Image (cartoon, rainbow, N blue to C red):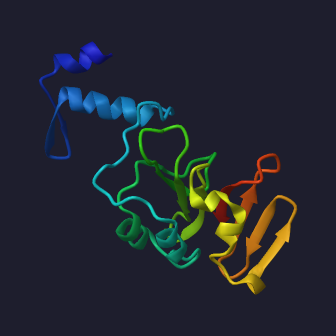
Amino acid sequence: MLEMVKSYSRVTCANFRFPALLAAACLIAACSSSHKGLQTVRDRPKLQLGTVELLKIGVAGRAEVWRMLGVPDWRLSPDNTRKTEQWYYFEGDDASTPRLLVAFNPGTWVLHNMVWDVRSDDPESDPQKLLDRYPKDKIESAEGRHIVKTLGATISVDKETGKATMIIWK
């Protein structure tokens, strides 16, 4: 198939002309479900937990998320397996686990939920340091998780290591 695409000098799409190789690369990337080899966007600022916490579930829209976080590395549209549009933000050379996932309700494009991956070398991987960010009277703790009521966030803690592993906003 790639040879067939290369044989054409140009591919025309909506009054724009693309080199055939670029068109083939876009086609392969769109059809691929693997994140291997994914390059993160280098020109956006480093993702900060404090910035993510400013986004409000059910209030923030795609434009606000784009403005605050920048261009996502990967976007998946809703289909019969996903009810939301999902944006994935990766950091560094690790394309196996996104640092942040944001999901939007289709039609309204309002923020539905977010998942922040807490890395083992993050200061926030210590649950106590993470919980110190929030008012004590707004936290409910149960086995393996803490719920920050004011943010609508759940902090998951690994039972074996005792480290925070993710923050989920719904």
- When the figure is inspected, residue 18 is found, relative to residue 65, above or below; the finding is above
Q: How many labels does the image show?
A: 0
Which quadrant of the figure has residue 111?
Answer: bottom right
The quadrant of the rendering that contains the N terminus is top left
Q: Which of 165 and 160 is in front in this view?
A: 160
Instruction: Residue 57: give x, y in percent of width and height.
Output: 58, 74
* Quadrant hosting residue 151: bottom right
User: Is residue 48 placed above or below 28 in the rendered structure?
Assistant: below
Residue 146 in view of the camera: yes
Residue 170 visible from this viewpoint: no
Q: Where is residue 47 in the image (x, y as percent from the top left)?
A: 44, 60
Q: Is residue 169 left or right of residue 145?
A: left
Look at the image and tell me in which quarter the C terminus lies: bottom right
Q: Where is residue 163 in the image (x, y as percent from the top left)?
A: 72, 54
Q: Taking 4 as reference, is 146 left or right?
A: right
Residue 153 placement (x, y as % from top left): 68, 70
